[in-house]
Image (cartoon, rainbow, N blue to C red):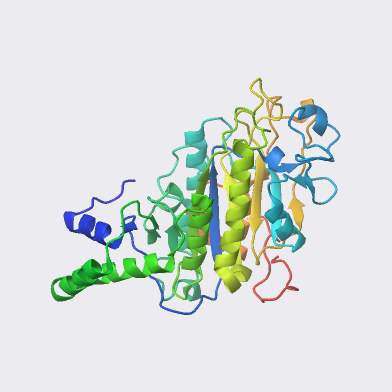
Amino acid sequence: MTMPPISRRQSLFAVAAGAAGLAVPAVAAAGEARGRRLVVILLRGGLDGLSAVAPVGDPDHETARAGLAPGATGARAGLPLDGFFALHPALSGFASLWAERQLAIVHAVGTPYRDRSHFDAQNVLETGAQTAHGREIGWLNAALAGLPQKSAAARRELAMAIAQQTPLILRGPNPAATWSPSALPDADADTLERLMALYGERDLAMAGALAAARQANMLAEGMAPGGGRSAFISLAEAAGRFLRQPDGPVAAVLELSGWDTHANQTAQQGLLVRSLTQLDQGVLALRAALGPVWSDTVVAVVTEFGRTVAMNGALGTDHGTGGAAFLLGGAVAGGRVVTDWPGLAAARLQEGRDLRVTTDLYAVLKGVLEDHLEIGPSTVRRAVFPDSATAPLRGLVLAASAGPGRAPSS
């Protein structure tokens, strides 16, 4: 699918407003949202789930992951979870959420895709199809049509991509907005006021769009990277500000690249550590920006595939199969790793090299959509994942009745 062309007038408007993206989100003047929220974070490049969540209790772990396994002490020591799994030390914020029972990990998980192309694997991850290019719309866009009326009412857009363009997961017939910081210098206040007056007299549609863009930028003010903050952390914070608005979107999508760790994977300042640190700090920034809405939120962190079990000759890992996914948020039934662990013995590996997939990622997503966003099972089965026969994975989220003692949905 392609984005619609931009007219000269729309281009002028984007420059004047300092707003990147073609769609401008509606922003409320005051107050905060109540109601459930879903954030999907796409990790592009293939996260090594065995490093992010190491199976230190597996008897074959140290041998199979020679050179990659975390040490018992020192900078690479893992953060213990349940006696069998340990988090990467860069995920200290995730560890704190685990302690609060606001993090659930699904391990040995993957989509139906079994080859090793980033492009094709991401296509499957975002469309919900069984094969690459088997569908033209995103599964999250398709899910928006099934939102209950109480969730969809009084919202201009049902979902938002915090990105310069709409990712495939949100493309389709249902309304979705995009927002990202502009690289252009901001117009001064006098220019904006003159434009508002001009459009107010001659073009009410453009006047409304300009006003919405100004509100959006004011809402996200201060979110531009700086002072050592990564762009992802800033965007995550902005996402939280949009989602907590009374008429803000129900769902948001963020993207984070940097997971294709073919070389020097264990370097202290290497790509994996930097990416995990950004992810960890970004989720904490999202939580802070959401405020009380965090208690009604599920954050699903997913990637296109895992990586090889054994280290390669460049001290990294290559494209694999099974990996790890994360569910975080106040609405998550957390403090546990959900897995049918296949083991790391050589005879148990996919094609003799990868962690086997024993849990379908689509089952996880179906469970979140049905139990958290209250999308009907028939919609999920027929419209969201129409070619998938796997049953939804239950018990991943808390029941609708708020409070720390609420039970998992069944």
Q: Judge whether residue 121 can be spotted in this image.
A: yes
Taking the spot 78% from the left edge, 44% from the top edge, the residue there is 78
Which residue appears farthest toward the front when viewing the image? 227
Q: How many marks?
A: 0
- The one of 410 and 71 positioned closer to us in this rendering: 71
Which residue appears farthest toward the top when viewing the image? 313
- The one of 30 and 375 positioned closer to us in this rendering: 30
Taking the spot 80% from the left edge, 40% from the top edge, the residue there is 74
- The one of 123 and 99 positioned closer to us in this rendering: 99
Residue 322 appears at what percent x and percent y? 66, 37
**Residue 269, picture quadrant:** top right
Q: Quadrant of the C terminus?
A: bottom right
Which residue appears farthest toward the left when viewing the image? 202
Residue 112 appears at what percent x and percent y? 58, 39
Taking the spot 65% from the left edge, 66% from the top edge, the residue there is 331
Residue 227 appears at what percent x and percent y? 52, 53
Q: Judge whether residue 391 can be spotted in this image.
A: no
> Height in image: 164 above or below 39?
above
> Height in image: 108 above or below 144?
above
Residue 174 appears at what percent x and percent y? 39, 60
Task: Tell me if 356 is positioned left or right of 73 in this view.
Answer: left
Taking the spot 54% from the left edge, 39% from the top edge, the residue there is 258
**Residue 53, picture quadrant:** top right
> Height in image: 374 above or below 178?
below
- The one of 274 and 161 positioned closer to us in this rendering: 274
Task: Tell me if 271 is positioned left or right of 242 in this view.
Answer: right
**Residue 172, picture quadrant:** bottom left
